[in-house]
Image (tube, helix red, strand yellow):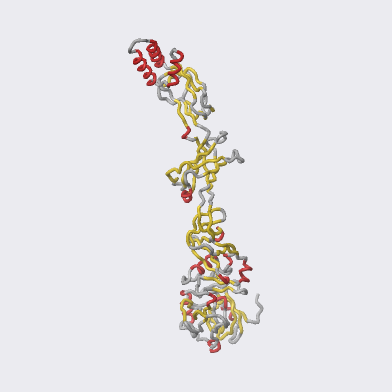
Amino acid sequence: MTRIGPYVGATVVVAAAAAAGGYWLAMSRMPALSAEAAAQAAEPEPGRKVLYWYDPMVPQQKFDKPGKSPFMDMQLVPKYADEGGDEATVSISPRVVQNLGIRTAEARPGSLAPKLAAVGNVDWNERSVVLVQPRANGFIERLYVRAPLDAVRAGDPLVEILFPEWAAAQEEYLLLRRLSTPDAEALGSAARQRLVLLGMSEEQIGAVEREGRAQPRVTLRAPVSGVIAELGAREGMTVSMGATLFRIAGVGTVWVVAEVPEAQAAMLVPGERVEARVPAYPADVFPGRVSAILPEVNATTRTVRARVEVANPAGKLKPGMYATLMLSPRAREGLLVPSEAVIRTGERSVVILAGAEGKFRAVEVEVGMESGDSAEIRKGLKAGDKVVVSGQFLIDSEASLRTTLARLEGAGEPQAAPAADAAYRGRGKVNAVDLARGFVELDHDAIPSMKWPAMTMGFVVESKAQLVGIQRGAEVEFELRPKPNQDGDFVITRIVPATEQRR
């Protein structure tokens, strides 16, 4: 566990097992601690319970009593119970918590009503399309609708057709109706059936019976209200039985084929309510419902097509229009946290869990559906847990986000090192100087930022010129990099006499 005090911005752990090996190599070249430094054993603070003792250079090894480290020439230091034994936990004083503006929220059960936006194009409702075809061969004598996309109402006349075959059959039927012979009724019934087979409707046969004369000319009327989507008739042309003269599309409802991302396809359910809007009428909302989820995925856009049936009572929606859809899938119950509390690292989703007495730790979670400012947590939290929603990136202000998460998430995992150009300051007394090698041995004070106690240690100086004028016994101030070089030596980037004014 790393404790961040009120006077220290943050503490970055840099002594992983690999770095410890380099440190061992460096220490093997140096003289032992001075008698004065070795005598400075780490004493436990009064009133605090010690969990175990450890070497800061090899923190994974624990000891049950104080003493000298078997790895380094230094004293073991205590690990306190109020710091927690979990290295994945960061403890921050209440004062720092307040200064960082850290806010928390409670994970709570709730209902999540997601909103799904999609776009699509308006098209005819194919279920309301009807075809007008002749039931016999004939000739068009008069055309009432002359252009495609003309609007028609149910019952409006469309075309008048002369059916020569009907004329002879109707005359025969009328003649048999006038006969009074015993077999006249049976013959009349057969003649009437012939009219039906020729394509005459019961209404047309009834008109012949009422008027008592043949009616070879028939006017075909619109069966539904809509527009002429297809026109295949012209005056004077010959028509064959079954030829399509008119294709009428109803306009009471239209289809909007929406493109929905594949990842959100599971949210679509036939029957769900939809609100549609078009740029032509920005103030109007057209209600509709999902009528079908088409069983195919667009391989280019990775989208699923949903067929939405939208009400169009005023006929404002026209095929080809661009429409924006807002779908409202059914609400689902779950454990909810604010969306801003979830940190996505690219490989996992993490939330910072706030514990008692200013302790914080990272918890990996499985995120489900999101809507608005709430996210569903499927796994990793329980109701009542408090998560950090503001300031989680400032919990360790001296470490990058990736370093912070790596250090918080895994006790026992290799600790992330600070940036290579980061430097730490210290103060000490010069024991020896080797200007030719650029080497200096210091009896330095404790360096809290690196969790180093006071010890005697040798360093390589980046610029040998800085050692000019540095004498044995002088008090110096220095800056060093937090990790050793490839030879295992810690490198001082700046060293000056303690009396020299810093620039």
Where does residue 428 sit, x and y in percent of width and height? Answer: 59, 83
Where does residue 498 sit, x and y in percent of width and height? Answer: 63, 81
Image quadrant in which you'd find residue 137? top left
For the point 50% across and 82% down, which residue is it?
76
The C terminus - image quarter = bottom right
Extreme-right residue of the structure: 501
Residue 29, visible in the rendered structure = no
| For residue 55, above or below residue 303 | below
- Observer-nearest residue: 45 or 345? 45
For the point 51% across and 68% down, which residue is it?
408
For the point 62% across and 70% down, which residue is it?
96
Where does residue 94 sit, x and y in percent of width and height? Answer: 61, 71
Where does residue 281 sit, x and y in percent of width and height? Answer: 60, 38
- Observer-nearest residue: 104 or 138? 104
Looking at the rendered structure, the number of numbered marks drawn on it comes to 0
Extreme-bottom residue of the structure: 35
- Observer-nearest residue: 36 or 213? 213
| For residue 185, above or below residue 398 | above
| For residue 481, above or below residue 112 | below
Residue 365, visible in the rendered structure = yes
